[in-house]
């Protein structure tokens, strides 16, 4: 499955897509897995960002 996008594909997602090619998963399955993994990365990034409060807010608390 060739995914063409503006941003680079995360290495873990790329490896997963390669594994799906090896097991000859259909395109719909690849799309579902890709979208799920992307959503997990977004959730992780939001969690990390929310834990990194600006220093100003830490001073005022």
Image: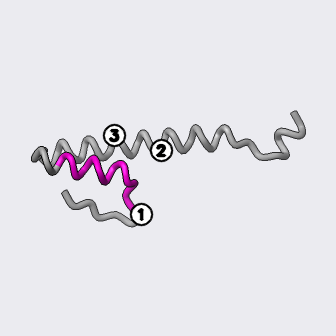
Check contact, mark 3 vs mark 1: CB within 8 A: no
Label 2 crowd bin: few (<14), some (14–19), many (20+), radius 10 Å: few
The mark found on residue 36 in the picture is 3
Residue at image point 41% right, 42% down: 39
Q: Relative to residue 52, is residue 8 depicted above or below?
A: below
Q: Which residues are magenta?
A: 8-20
Q: How far is disc 2 from disc 3 in space, using C-alphas?
A: 10 Å
Q: Quadrant of residue 9?
A: bottom left
The spot of residue 24 in percent (x, y) is 10, 47
Q: How many marks?
A: 3
Q: Relative to residue 29, is residue 15 depicted above or below?
A: below
Query: Which quadrant of the figure contains the C terminus?
Result: top right
**Relative depth, front residue between 10 and 49:** 10
The mark found on residue 42 in the picture is 2
Label 3 crowd bin: few (<14), some (14–19), many (20+), radius 10 Å: few
Q: How far is disc 3 from disc 1 in space, using C-alphas?
A: 17 Å
Label 1 crowd bin: few (<14), some (14–19), many (20+), radius 10 Å: few
N-term mark: 1 or 2: 1
């Amino acid at each position: 499955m060739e995914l063409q996008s503006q941003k680079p594909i995360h290495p873990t997602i790329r490896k997963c897509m390669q594994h799906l090619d090896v097991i000859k998963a259909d395109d719909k399955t690849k799309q579902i897995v890709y979208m799920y993994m992307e959503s997990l990365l977004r959730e992780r990034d939001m969690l990390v960002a929310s834990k990194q409060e600006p220093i100003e807010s830490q001073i005022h608390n």
